[in-house]
């Protein structure tokens, strides 16, 4: 898990990109899914789900939808072992692949995330910082930069009011 985060940092810093980035995530994926390391325990499957998601996203950055389809077919159950990793991966793959390539019906169907899945995965972590992404996911706005504001009605014993705060 920590190696995945380290690779993300290297990618953000710009020291890893393109094929180099994919190769590093591929190496991490291969180590995680090797027969000698793979364990069907809850903790291990959660890590494997995240690792698979990271590798799939790196492949999407390179436009390799064929390998993505193959890996999803082979490891679909592992990706879904961790609800959050699955939802985040599928949302990211939709964002990266959707506009660029014509996804096959099966792949497009697998990558779709319905509102119930999103809420089940992140219900306990629905912070206001996530609202722009949720609004994009639900089609309320087209992109997070479109912003908006969140209004909350406050009904207390002293004063009733509505408070609005910008998302961004």
Image (cartoon, helix red, strand yellow):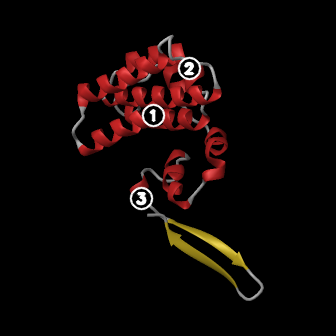
Residue position for label 2: 76
Image quarter of residue 87 = top right
Q: Earlier in the sequence, mark 2 or mark 3?
A: 2
Q: Which residue sits furthest right?
A: 157
Q: Earlier in the sequence, mark 1 or mark 2?
A: 2
Contact flag, marks 2 and 3 (Cβ < 8 Å): no
* Residue at the image point whose x is 39% and y is 16% from the top: 67
User: In the rendered image, which quarter contains the C terminus?
Assistant: bottom left
Residue position for label 1: 94
Q: Nearer the viewer, mark 3 or mark 1?
A: 1
* Front position in the image: 17 or 150: 17
Secondary structure at numbered mark 3:
helix
Residue 123's place in the image compared with 88, above or below, is below
Q: Earlier in the sequence, mark 3 or mark 1?
A: 1
Residue 128's place in the image compared with 81, above or below, is below
Residue position for label 3: 146
- Return the x and y of residue 135 as percentages of the image width and height: 53, 52
Is there any visible trace of residue 36 in the rendered image? yes
Other-residue count near label 1 (Cα within 10 Å), few / some / many at <14 / 14–19 / ≥20:
many
Secondary structure at numbered mark 2:
helix
Contact flag, marks 3 and 1 (Cβ < 8 Å): no
- Return the x and y of residue 80 as percentages of the image width and height: 60, 27
Separation (CA) of disc 2 from disc 3:
34 Å
- Return the x and y of residue 30 as percentages of the image width and height: 41, 17
* Residue at the image point whose x is 62% and y is 19% from the top: 40
- Return the x and y of residue 32 as percentages of the image width and height: 47, 21
Residue 155's place in the image compared with 146, above or below, is below
Separation (CA) of disc 3 from disc 1:
19 Å
Q: Which residue sits furthest front?
A: 36
* Front position in the image: 121 or 64: 121
Secondary structure at numbered mark 1:
helix
């Amino acid at each position: 898990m920590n190696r995945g985060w380290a690779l993300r940092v290297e990618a953000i810093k710009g020291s890893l990109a393109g094929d180099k980035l994919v190769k590093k995530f591929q190496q991490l994926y291969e180590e995680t899914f090797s027969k000698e390391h793979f364990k069907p325990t809850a903790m291990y499957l959660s890590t494997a789900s995240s690792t698979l998601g990271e590798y799939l996203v790196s492949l999407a950055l390179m436009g390799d939808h064929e390998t993505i389809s193959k890996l999803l077919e082979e490891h679909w159950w592992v990706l879904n072992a961790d609800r959050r990793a699955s939802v985040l991966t599928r949302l990211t793959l939709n964002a990266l692949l959707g506009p660029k390539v014509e996804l096959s019906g099966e792949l497009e169907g697998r990558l779709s995330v319905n509102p119930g899945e999103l809420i089940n995965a992140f219900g306990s972590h629905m912070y206001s910082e996530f609202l722009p992404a949720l609004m994009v996911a639900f089609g309320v706005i087209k992109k997070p930069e479109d912003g908006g504001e969140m209004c909350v009605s406050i009904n207390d014993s002293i004063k009733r009011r509505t408070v609005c705060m910008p998302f961004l």
